[in-house]
Amino acid sequence: MDWEDRLDGWELELELNAQLDGSEWVTLDRAATQTGASRAALRSWYRSGQIPSRLVDGPHGPQRLVPLRLVAARAEASPRLRHAAQRQLAEQAQLEILRHRIDQLETRVSELEHGLRHRQS
């Protein structure tokens, strides 16, 4: 490999990085974190053509990128992911109901204790 080839390769890498700055293309880790889809699901989706992907040189070798907007749309259409999100919301709602009931019980116990103190005096 001569210096001209290396320079051409670096120029291509710089050009690609400039194109990706501010774009919607993200790493698999970031897409998984932001959409709730597993990395295995993301791999399955890009391998089956459900979402596009790119392979770019990263700091530690080749790195797969996917468009976040399309991953989010695909994740939203996934029944399993939708059910998981609904289940999580239902659990949060139940937790809030339980917190409210505990607050009510604490208020009631406090009132009963206050009433007992007045009767004893």
Image (cartoon, rainbow, N blue to C red):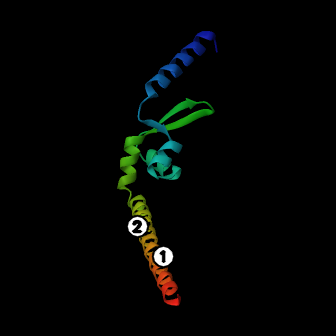
Mark 1 Cα shell of 10 Å, populated few (<14), some (14-19), many (≥20): few
| Viewer-nearest residue: 40 or 35 | 35
Point out residue 90 in the picture as x, y percentages from the top left corner: 40, 67
Q: Would residue 119 be found to the left or right of residue 69 on screen?
A: right
Q: Would residue 85 be found to the left or right of residue 9 on screen?
A: left
Q: Would residue 10 be found to the left or right of residue 83 on screen?
A: right
Q: Is residue 101 above or below residue 7?
A: below
Which amino acid type is marked by label 1? Glu
Q: Quadrant of the N terminus?
A: top right
Point out residue 73 in the picture as x, y percentages from the top left corner: 35, 48
Which amino acid type is marked by label 2? Ala
Mark 2 Cα shell of 10 Å, populated few (<14), some (14-19), many (≥20): few
Give the labeled residue for mark 2: 93
Q: Is residue 86 above or below residue 103?
A: above
Q: Is residue 52 above or below residue 56?
A: below
Q: Is residue 38 visible?
A: yes
Mark sitting earlier along the chain (1/2): 2
Give the labeled residue for mark 1: 106
Point out residue 17 in the picture as x, y percentages from the top left corner: 49, 25
Q: Is residue 23 above or below residue 83?
A: above
Q: Would residue 117 be found to the left or right of residue 76 on screen?
A: right
Q: Is residue 50 visible?
A: no
